[in-house]
Image (cartoon, coloured by chain):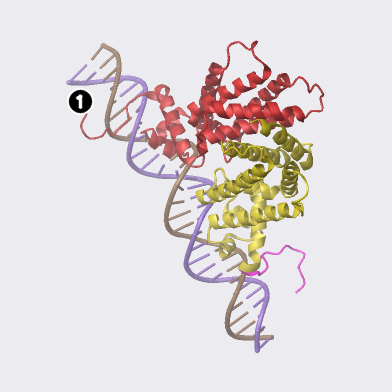
Chain colours: A yellow, B red, C purple, D brown
Amino acid sequence: MVEDPERRRRARHLGPERRRPLILDAALEVFSANGFAGTTMQSVADAAGVTKPVVYDSFANRDELLLALLAREEQHLVVSIVAALPADPSVGTPEEHVLEGLTAFLTAVSEQPQSWRIVFGAQYGAAPVVAERVRAARAFLVESLRLTLLKSLPGVGDPDANLPVLAELLASMTESCARMLVVDGTDRSPAELAKTVSQVVAGGFGNV
Amino acid sequence: MVEDPERRRRARHLGPERRRPLILDAALEVFSANGFAGTTMQSVADAAGVTKPVVYDSFANRDELLLALLAREEQHLVVSIVAALPADPSVGTPEEHVLEGLTAFLTAVSEQPQSWRIVFGAQYGAAPVVAERVRAARAFLVESLRLTLLKSLPGVGDPDANLPVLAELLASMTESCARMLVVDGTDRSPAELAKTVSQVVAGGFGNV
DNA sequence: GGCAGTTCCTACCGGACTGTAGGAATTTCC
DNA sequence: GGAAATTCCTACAGTCCGGTAGGAACTGCC
């Protein structure tokens, strides 16, 4: 049948399998616009051009939907970051590795702001299960940074263990840069911000 | 009348004037335990040992209640910080001033964790008017830090304006330390954390 | 003790959200 | 073209929340 000029009244028959990614797209959009509290099943359904029961055919409940969205966007970020990392880790100084890692991360963030927004913005006010998932992702990041620092600052073999604090500070600066890029807006490029942070790390962390 | 051994069924007659602070206390407790979304008028009333209409006798609506709570706790923090600041700002180096300011702030935070929790934790998922209020408080803090940096790093007269970024980084490290103290828990004292941050600033910010 | 005024509580309304049942439309397969 | 299976939509139940009306209990004053 030829399409009538009037709008479709019913959504195309796709089934849960093919509908899921479309619903996740809609949920991501709604979340970016309205935050966690505004991401209701109804609003997601509206954004997907579908009705609520269709959403429930794809996701058992609201938590499942948000968890699936979180997992997908987290995966996007991870893939982008890994792709941006230098291929050969045997060349260059540890400081350069920090710089490269930060640049890769911030570039990925700036290219996929919505992914970052949900992965790092859903930890407040979200259902406990979702918040826990976000915390786990962040803990993983902090641990990676801690290992990088360990390689980058061989002088501090002393296990006096200021390293956890420094790793936390580096992670918070990284998150802060991401926030500048995505939320506040800044005229700096990801590479410039990464350079600033890595210089602070290089100059400042040695003295501690 | 003598108190019966059985529990009071009705709350004491206090009136809005004397009831307000008690309700704010209850709201602070509920917020610390259940976060923003869990801070409903009913739960606040329960925590205050009172019914919902009594809460509405003291505060016109939920936003008013949260705004009042925010204002009170922010004031607590400000008073604590000012009290902890050095009396004479003419002695000592700028670096020492940064250290002293950070120590004052983090000490205040660790002594009033609930105040910090609401003042800096209500920005996500809260009603727009509340979130805006929190952002304003944070912007004020960042600006203060920027001015401190300006005094502390006279070498960078160059208005190349990396200063805003550095101020933001310092603010994020400060918040991170606060989070370590209040949320995550750490074995470091406020003074130790302040020292670490100020050393990072001293060593790292000069190179940028 | 008794009365006036204040304060509190029970009971309720309207609205929004989660989640579901059952019928209507579409697609597929022959 | 027509039947069967799949998919979607309308309509609704249940729950919780913000907010309110009106009557019951307490308090203070005489």
| Residue named by callout 1 | B2
Residue B195 in the image, given as x and y percentages of width and height? 60, 26
Image quarter in which the C terminus of chain B is found = top right
> What crowding class fits label 1: few (fewer than 14 Cα within 10 Å), some (14-19), or many (20 or more)?
few
Q: Position of residue C22 (x, y in %)?
A: 49, 70
Q: Position of residue A101 (x, y in %)?
A: 72, 46
| Secondary element at tag 1 | loop
Query: Does A14 lie within the magenta span?
Result: yes
Q: Using the image as rendered, state which of residue A24 and residue A175 is in the foreground.
A: A175
Q: Which residue shows up at 40% across the image and 22% down it?
A: B18
- Res A172 seen here: yes
Q: Is residue B163 above or below residue A34?
A: above
- Residue A35 appearing in the image: no
Give the side of residue B166 with respect to residue A70, left or right. right
Please state the total of marks drawn on the protein image: 1
Q: Quadrant of the N terminus of chain B?
A: top left
Closer to us: A185 or A5: A185
Residue B122 falls in image quadrant: top right
Name the chain under label 1.
B
- Segment colored magenta: A1-15
Q: Residue A47 in the image: x percent, y percent?
A: 66, 55
Majority SS type along the magenta span: loop
Q: Is residue B98 left or right of residue B8?
A: right
Quadrant housing residue B94: top right
Task: Give me the residue at 33% from left, 25% from top.
Answer: B13
Vertical placement of residue D19 versus B91, above or below: below
Which residue type does callout 1 highlight? Val
Residue at the (76%, 42%) spot, across then down: A190
